[in-house]
Amino acid sequence: MKQTIEIIPGIGPQLDFDVIKKRTLQVAPFVEWIHIDIADGKFVDNKTLLDPAPFKDLIAETKKDFELHMMVKSPFTAAKKWAEAGFLRLIMHIENVSDEKVIKDTMYTMKRAHKDLQIGLAIDSETPVEAVFPYLQAVDNILVMTIKAGFSGQELIPELLEKVRILRTKKYYLPISVDGGINDTNSQAVIAAGANRLISTSYLFNSKDIKEAVQTLRILPPK
């Protein structure tokens, strides 16, 4: 089966919607999905814009699909309003959810209300990969953090790619995203580990040519 690699620009944790909009419009012509981070200052140290209302018009303007990385203590409380704003993929941190039945029931209820909604789980750098095993049949994707969640601009921790390798052997067809420090020097190692969605922030926005940078990250490793 041919491997399809998606490059998803991470807009980065932002308080200023003008910055979010500017960055989104910069990358939108070259990708299908846009990755937005929200943080409540509790799960991670920083805090971002937490109001989904401005995104409705941005989603309509760009005609792109938006995913939300929820670095918040109460993801289920926030999830409904972001789905109503037009986000098609919500990614909650496994560290902030504990009851397996509640998670699965909530996912089922939300996906019935929003038929195109995808729900994923993120796993932070210090959390064992086994934490997400009970949910692999229920979720639409897994996001592996290769940095400590919170701030962009950190360097990828290569040892954390072992989580991707383990997950890929557990369920071959499940989309696996990697977020944290992805650039042109490590993207092939990330793909080789088994990821098929690469979320990149600093590398893309620091590039002189974003279109070329996106294409570079898609290059498959040699067999």
Image (tube, grey):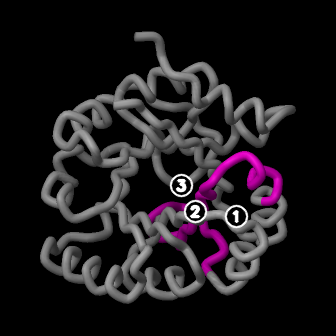
Task: Tell me whether the residue at label 3 lies in contact with that at label 2, contact meaning CB atoms closer than 8 angstroms.
Answer: no
> Helix, strand or loop at disc 2?
strand
Q: Residue sitting at 78 percent across and 73 percent down? A: 61
Q: Residue at x 84, y 69 (%)?
A: 18
Question: Does 73 sit left or right of 87 as displayed?
Answer: left
The reply to whether residue 160 is visible in this rendering is no
Label 1 with label 2: CB-CB less than 8 Å: yes
Badge 3 crowding class, 10 Å Cα cut-off, few under 14, some 14 to 19, many 20 or more, is many
Residue picked out by circle 3: 150
Q: Which residue is mark 2?
A: 37
Label 3, label 2: how far apart the Cα atoms are: 9 Å
Disc sitting over residue 120 in the figure:
none
Secondary structure of the residue carrying numbered label 3: loop
In the rendered image, the vertical position of residue 55 relative to residue 20, given as above or below:
below
Q: Is residue 112 above or below residue 119?
A: below
- Residue 196 appears at what percent x and percent y? 43, 38
Tell me where the magenta segment starts and ends, as one range.
Answer: 25-51
Q: Residue at x 61, y 42 (%)?
A: 200
**Quarter of the image holding residue 92?**
bottom left
- In this figure, which residue is indicated by the disc labeled 1? 14
Residue 222 location in percent, x, y? 46, 11
Q: Residues within 10 Å of mark 1 (few under 14, many from 20)?
A: some
Is residue 196 at least partly visible in the picture?
Answer: yes
Question: What amino acid is labelled 2 in the image?
Answer: Asp
The mark lying in front, picked from 3 and 2, is 2
The tag earlier along the polypeptide, 1 or 3, is 1
Q: Hey, what amino acid is under mark 3?
A: Gly
Circle 1: residue type? Gln
